[in-house]
Image (tube, rainbow, N blue to C red):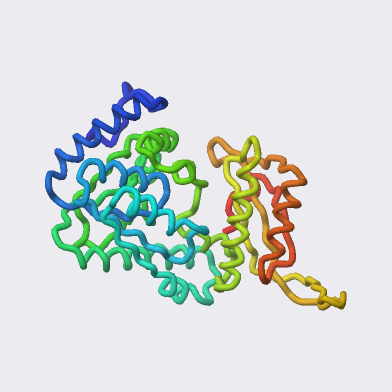
Amino acid sequence: MSSNVRPESMERITTEALATAFIDEQIAEIKAQVGDKKVLLALSGGVDSSVVAALLIKAIGQNLVCVHVNHGLLRKGEPEQVIEVFKNQMNANLIYVDATDRFLDKLAGVADPEKKRKIIGAEFIDVFAEEAKKLEGIEFLAQGTIYPDILESDGVKAHHNVGGLPEELNFELVEPVKLLYKDEVRVVGKVLGLPDNMVYRQPFPGPGLGVRCVGAITRDRLEALREADAIVREEIGKLPETPWQYFCAIPDIQSTGIKYDANGKGERYMGWAVVIRAVNTTDAVKVTVPEIPFATLCKMRDQIVQIPGVNRVLWDISEKPVATIEWE
């Protein structure tokens, strides 16, 4: 499977047996390509990079060096999960970089979504490159490129999978899942033993919560969003049939709220609104909005308004077209 063109004869990976055969084949190919050299991987915790990491750990063990950059824009519990799964359970050679302050300082006061994306992407590459320069003996760069990336963007994933590295760090690529579609990657991930909440992780933009904290990011509003997002994912995830994607955003607006003291005296204050978003789609071109039981909406509301600074909960029922899935 060395070509960037998916062979027409390649069977869709839909079963454990097919996934096991694919894993065995890729382990052999990785060993043949890499030998006893070292491989560097930017491990985001998403299914693509996680499956690549698990494959490479099986193939070359400690000769894989994973770098997990926490830019402060991840969802609640995600950095901890990467450390638990890969370092503690799989004994990966993992470097964890907490760059939260560095990213948020660069983003302070920046409201334009494209500028935010560029800052996050550029800073990620800078942090990753700095970590790479500290290492010796790296000759290969692993990427979680999948087949749609090749079809849509010439095989380059420009954020977490580190397209655009400085020239001195443009190592030979290792891309073991580049001929797979996302659903096939998930089947492989299950067989590799990755946890379900990693294998079936909600689609998540490269800039993370940075584009769901609408407008200029402030730390308090970002933390409120992170907590609200965890509530939404928990409660909607309990439904018998879950939507294709569900999350929340926090617009850069304030609304009037009221809170009462122990004596029943009310005090008005300005707070934030949290917007719940749930969508269904097969191609991301046309997006519909599923019905969410009102009891579930109320349960989320009652929890979200307990978050400091939040006093309003909205449900976004906009479809695409005309609205996009994300707010920014």
**Which image quarter is the C terminus in?**
bottom right
Q: From the viewer's perspective, is 3 left or right of 81?
A: left
Q: Residue at x 32, y 29 (%)?
A: 20
Identify which residue, 199 or 143, lies in the foreground. Answer: 199
Q: Position of residue 120 (x, y in %)?
A: 43, 65
Q: From the viewer's perspective, is 282 left or right of 164?
A: right
Q: Residue at x 64, y 69 (%)?
A: 252
Q: Position of residue 29 (x, y in %)?
A: 19, 36
**Which image quarter is the N terminus in?**
top left
Residue sitting farthest toward the top: 9
Answer above or below: position of 88 versus 259. above
Q: Position of residue 215 (x, y in %)?
A: 58, 68
Number of labelled discs? 0
Answer above or below: position of 20 versus 306. above
Q: From the viewer's perspective, is 273 left or right of 72?
A: right
Answer above or below: position of 183 versus 214. above
Q: Position of residue 49 (x, y in %)?
A: 36, 48
Residue sitting farthest toward the right: 264
Q: Residue at x 55, y 35 (%)?
A: 282
Q: Residue at x 14, y 38 (%)?
A: 32
Identify which residue, 279 or 137, lies in the foreground. Answer: 137
